[in-house]
Image (cartoon, helix red, strand yellow):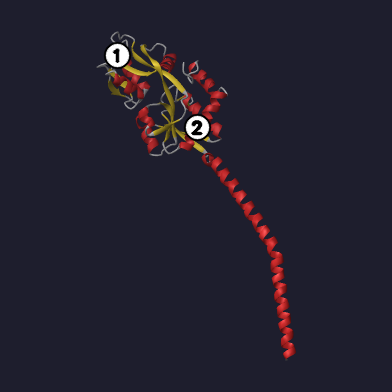
Amino acid sequence: MKKLVSLLLIVGVIGTFTGCGEKVASSEPASSNSEIEVSETVEETVEETESVEETETKTRDSITFATEGTYSPYSYHNEEGELVGFDVEVAKAVADKLGVEAKFTETQWDGIIAGLDAGKYDAIANQVSITDERKEKYLFSDPYTYVYGVVIVNGDNEDINSFEDLDGKDVSLTITSNWAKLAESYGGKIVSTNGFSESIQLVLEGRADATVNDNVTFLDFKASQPDANAKIVATSEEATESAILIRKEDADLQKDINEALGELRADGTLSAIAEKYFGEDITVAH
């Protein structure tokens, strides 16, 4: 019995040392493999994090732009009823550069910025003038339009020949537009309208003394209605810059749009779109 107990103790001791030997022998490779796996996992995680950072602003599959749809030649419907225009094509070109679809929501100017605030669309492509007041609350893309303000009156009007002459006169404009602020700065009394078509019609009918808008909009109007009894009597010295308007919190979208606009400017696309609609390049300051 004592021999049996002694034998069992010896076997147990040998077994214990053998087991420890196996654990020690295998512990180094296990530790080494573990380090490799952790290292590879960290590298993969870093790569995945970098990939997410690089594509974070590209995850959207579309950008919805707000536009009036009644503001020729920037945003209007052609004879087939399709939404076309300078701003529409620029927005489509930007989206194409970003590899996403351009979608459009048509709305009247007076409510277009409120709609952006409400999250009804991602951005506004509708000749939004860059102002210090707007920059306090919103982000702008880089400017892609440089236009000059003009005073437009009925062809028979001889009383208004300058911006200063707007003092005390009825000026038909969308009340929240930058042009309305300009007219008011000269003492003009704003007659509220829903867009240029209505504004110029009031002037033609004698229900307003003048309207103020950009030079290319009027030139486009005269090209389509050469017999319209309206004329330009004054032009601003400085250009008004227009850009795509974006919510303050969408800095990533602003960055993407600016990159796209930069490429479109470099490859001549912006100039080509401008030439198509205006016969000259309005995407650069003169």
Q: Residues within 10 Å of mark 2 (few under 14, many from 20)?
A: many
Rendering coords of residue 24 (x, y %): 69, 67
Along the line of sight, which residue is nearer the eye, 95 or 259? 259
Specify the label residue 129 is tagged with.
none
- Residue 5 figure quarter: bottom right
Q: In this view, does 81 lie above or below 59?
A: above
**Residue sitting at 51 percent across and 18 percent down?**
275
Q: Is residue 102 above or below residue 38?
A: above
Total tally of numbered discs in the picture:
2
* Quadrant position of the N terminus in the picture: bottom right
Distance (Cα) linking label 1 and label 2: 38 Å
- Residue 272 figure quarter: top right
Q: For residue 82, say whether it is visible.
A: no
Q: For residue 125, say whether it is visible.
A: yes
Q: Label 1 amino acid?
A: Glu
User: Is 265 left or right of 223, judged from the image as shown?
Assistant: right
Label 2: which residue? 257
Rendering coords of residue 117 (x, y %): 38, 37
Rendering coords of residue 88 (x, y %): 48, 27
Along the line of sight, which residue is nearer the eye, 50 or 115? 50
Q: In this view, does 209 lie above or below 40?
A: above
Along the line of sight, which residue is nearer the eye, 277 or 79? 277
Which comes sooner in the sequence, label 1 or label 2? 1
Q: Label 2 amino acid?
A: Ile
**Residue sitting at 69 percent across and 68 percent down?**
23
Label 1: which residue? 164
Rendering coords of residue 106 (x, y %): 42, 31
**What element does badge 2 sit on?**
helix
**Residue sitting at 53 percent across and 42 percent down?**
56
- The single residue placed furthest to the left in the displayed view is 168
